[in-house]
Structure formats: C-alpha cells, structure tokens
Image (cartoon, grey):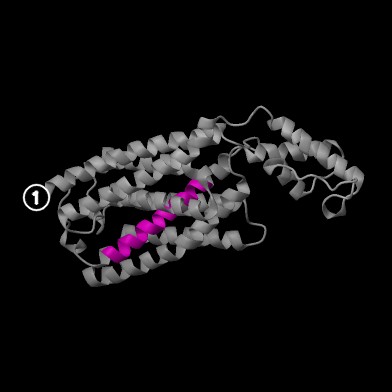
Amino acid sequence: MPVENSGLAVLSDQLVLVTVLLYVFAMIGYALDLGFGRSRSRARAAGAEAGADAGTEVPADAVLATVGGGTAPPAGGAAGPAGASAEAVEDMEAGEAAGRDATAGKEPSSWASRAGTVAVALTWLGWAAHLSAILTRGISVNRWPWGNMYEFVVAMCLAAVTAFLFMDLRYRVRFLGAFVTVAAALGLGFSVKYLEVQAGPVVPALNSYWIAIHVSAAIIASGLFTVAGVCGILYLVRKDTALRLPSREDLDRIAHRAIVISFPIWTFAVIAGALWADKAWGRYWGWDPKEVWAFITWIAYAAYLHARATAGFKGRAAMIVQLIAFGCLLFNLVGVNVFIGGLHSYAEVPG
C-alpha cells in the first residue's frame, strides 16, 4: 500500500540527513568550546594549589574569587573572609595571584568564546529539523510515526537531544553537548544506514491509540536514559587531570536526575504495554522476549536507584550498575529485534 503523500515522506528522509549534519557541526562547536574556551576548573585548581603551597587552606569563596575576579580586602589590613587573620589574608591573596598567573595569557580567543553559543544555536536548529522530520513522516502515512524500529530510533534520538536542551536551560550542562550530539548523530546515521524502511502503513496490531501511549512513554524514557548513559561513560573514562571536562560529581548528579525522571516513565510504559497486550492478544503478560527484556531493564534501573540511595554504594560502583542497565536498554532496543523473534517482530529490520 503506497504512502498517502510521497513528497512528505521524501522530505522527511532529507530532513533526517540535514539533522545529522547540524548535530555534527554542533558537536564540533561544543568540542571547540570545551577544548579552547574558558576553564573554570583550571583557575580554581591553580588558586587552591597556590594557597596550599603557602601553607594555608584557601576557603571556597576565596577560590571562587580566582575565577570570577577577586574582591579587594578591607582597607587597613582588616580580617578577610570569616574573620581570617592578616597572615591568612596575605596567603589567600598569594593564592589568588598565582591562580591569575596560571591563567594569564590563556584567555580564550573570541572565536572559542562564541563556539559554545553557536553550537547551542545549531543544536536547536537540528532539533527543529529533527522534529520536522518526524512530523512529516507521520503526516505522510497518516499515523503515529514510530511504528517500526527505524522510526523508534529516530524519535529516541530526538528525546535525548530534547532532554539535553531543557537540562541545559535549567542546569547549564553545555559541557555535555559534544557527547549528546555525537550520540544523536551516530544513532541517526545508524538508523539511516541499517534500519531505514520505506514509509508506509503498519501491521493491524499497531493501529491502536495505545501506540501513542505505550511507545511515546518508552521513547521519552529511552531518551533520558541515553543522557544518563552518556554521563556514565564520561564518569568512567574521565581522568583526574581533565580539568575542562565536567567533574565526576556533576556527571553523577546529572545522571541521577535523568534516571529519577525517566524511571517512572519507563514503569508507566511497561504497564501500558501490558494493558495493550491484553487488548491485542488477550493476555497481560506472555514472556515474549521484548516483554522480558523491558522488565529486565526496569529491574536494572531499579537496582541503580537502590544502589544510589544505599550508603557506601555510590560513585563508580553505582555508575557501573547504571551502565549495565543502559546496556539492557540497548539490547532490548536492538538485540531483541535483530536476533530474537517474537510477537514484537513488527520492528521491520531490513534484511
């Protein structure tokens, strides 16, 4: 059965390619900003080390002053922050001066300062093209545009980029831009190369309003899980000397927030899937491979949240559990559809 509007279907395919290019250019901009932009961590570390060399522990607010510009001490050698002695004030000033010296002559070039802003703008343009690609494909076939594996992966990449953009507005996590955009570009490239199928109608089992409920929830949760997975990978590979990368504490916090939001959404998706299965096949649960791995993924993320809340089981250990859960998610998405048959074989993976 041909598509209702082949022109929109072709436009959707072209918009996906445009989206990949925009995400790649955005990734380059984020990388330039990360590599050559201002490094708050480097200035903060330099000030702290100088204070330590002087034999005085530098207060946190004094270290922050080395980044944002120090404040002048009170006239007449009065006590500094928190009533510090004159000697402590002098040591703090020495630390601040050392921090300024460490970053002197290393101010980012104007192009490097603008690279991050341009990257964010390109990401929003890519997001708009990405959303348009999904909408035009849906309109071209007059159905919800996630009825096969290709469409699901495209929508999941959009959810990941959307999560990053809104988290950046709320928490200022631009440093993740290079990694999220490259993940989205690779996901879209993989789907175009290996998963793309011609736009068309879906099997009768998918002609249901449940696809707008169950699959939409799974897409949103998967996008958030992807952002958390990126944070987890960075957490494990990050070196202590990589001052321009986000700290492990920041990565841990962002991953945890993303999973706290996405876990109840995934729970709802599993429950909605069971309700849909009862309507379509007359039973809530049948141990279909897709159902089993969706439940395994749920258990794995529940284990992460439990581990994260358990004293003494945080940091690297909890992050490894999170990445195991992310691996379960990816296997549920790709492995089950490609290697294991079942009632969910409508994924239409090209042979």
Task: Name the amino acid type tagged 1.
Answer: Pro
In which quadrant is the C terminus drawn?
top left
Please tell me whether residue 72 is drawn above or below residue 171 in the rendered image: above
Q: For residue 339, say whether it is visible.
A: no
Q: Classify 261 as above or below 109.
A: below
Tag 1's secondary structure? loop
- For the point 42% across and 59% down, the residue is 296
Q: Residue furthest top?
A: 105
Q: Measuring from the top left, give residue 338's x and y in whole percent.
A: 29, 47
Q: Which residues are magenta?
A: 212-231
Residue 133 drawn at (x, y percent): 26, 48
Q: Which residue is mark 1?
A: 2
* Residue at the left extreme of this rendering: 1
Q: Residue at x 53, y 53 (%)?
A: 255
Depth order, front residue of 217/206:
217
Identify which residue, 204 or 144, lies in the foreground.
144
Q: Is residue 213 magenta?
A: yes
Q: Residue at x 49, y 53 (%)?
A: 169
Asked if 59 appears above or below 42 in the picture, the reply is below
> Does the rendering let one see residue 92?
yes
Q: Is residue 240 left or right of residue 29?
A: right
Which residue is painted at 58% across and 31% down in the image?
A: 108
What percent of the width, then of the height, locates residue 293? 38, 57
Magenta stretch: dominant secondary structure = helix
Which residue occupies the foreground of this view, 95 or 203? 95
Whether 99 is among the magenta residues is no
